[in-house]
Image (cartoon, rainbow, N blue to C red):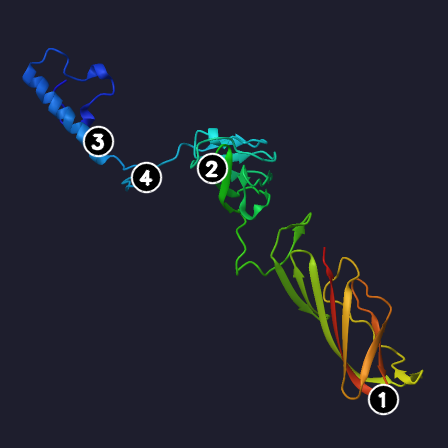
Amino acid sequence: MPIPSSINDLSTTAGSNSPSGSESPSTIDDYLRVYASYIALLRDQKLALAGGTMTGALNDAATQTIASATTTDIGAATSNVIIISGTTTITALGTIAAGARRSLRFTSTLVLTHNATSLVLPGSANIITLPGDVAEMRSLGGGNWVCTSYTYASGMYSRTNSVGTVSQSGGTVTGAIIETGSNASGTYTKFADGTMICRRSVIYSAIPITTATGGIFYSSGGIPGSSFAATFIANPNVVINVSPSSGLVWHAVFGNATTTTGPAIYAMSSTSSTVDVAVVQIAYGRWF
């Protein structure tokens, strides 16, 4: 082989490179100078261990699929980018030197089990994965891992999707965090944890508080219970406030609230009178 003009002329097979042993000393000297320059080139162009800037892409090996298991050994993976298949609960991720990183994408629903040392998860709580979720894991060494980020395929809550239609499946939130609405029966607010509050304000005109009993007067016909703007899963607690157009009026309830309607009330007064009465009803309970 003639004296190479660039490092690319060299072969990875030692026997294919020169000198072959029959060259003159001066030619061998030329080879040695060329090879020394290539060594210097490698020295000057290597990426510094303490930092440096790459001028090209750093590409990971092809994505590897690993089936979920109690110990899903991502430390032994052949790629930094891993697809986790299956539904087996994961409690450990295998052993590799501290600092190693792995990007995981889940294809099914399974449980990642939080452990304060071996599998540290955001919020120190278990995570139920959904297809398409992505997790970034970093090894702490000794079989211990920390999840540095977790992204749900459905997206995180923000100011654009926190308020909407709430929903759930088996107690797991599948919709927005807060839902509000109104109709002829008032307004309602549902929360993702199952809490619901319904409100209604009604003015009843010319209520006769004229039936005497024990030195006081009450509205003999009563005021019917108001319907709720949404249906509770069980009878809610109800708070009622009565405001008269004049005079001193208070109230008493009779009967119980149902999942759809508040209790009926009596308007009561120390004097016989006919007044307009504003009734505010607030009910709180659960929608699931």
First-in-chain label (3 vs 2): 3
Q: Residues within 10 Å of mark 1 (few under 14, many from 20)?
A: some
First-in-chain label (3 vs 1): 3
The single residue placed furthest to the top in the displayed view is: 22
Q: Which residue is mark 2?
A: 140
Identify which residue is drawn at 49% across, 30% down. 95
The kind of residue tagged 4 is Ala
First-in-chain label (2 vs 1): 2
The kind of residue tagged 3 is Leu
Which one is closest to the eye, mark 3 or mark 1?
3
Q: Which residue is mark 4?
A: 57
Q: Is residue 96 left or right of residue 19?
A: right
**SS class, disc 2:** strand
The kind of residue tagged 2 is Leu
- In this view of the protein, can residue 162 be seen by the observer? yes
Asked if the residues shown at circle 2 and circle 1 are in contact, with their CB atoms under 8 angstroms apart, the answer is no
Instruction: Kindly identify which numbered label has been placed on residue 42.
Output: 3
- Give the CA separation, mark 3 to mark 2: 33 Å
Residue 243 appears in which quarter of the rendering? Answer: bottom right
First-in-chain label (1 vs 4): 4
Q: Is residue 100 left or right of residue 8?
A: right
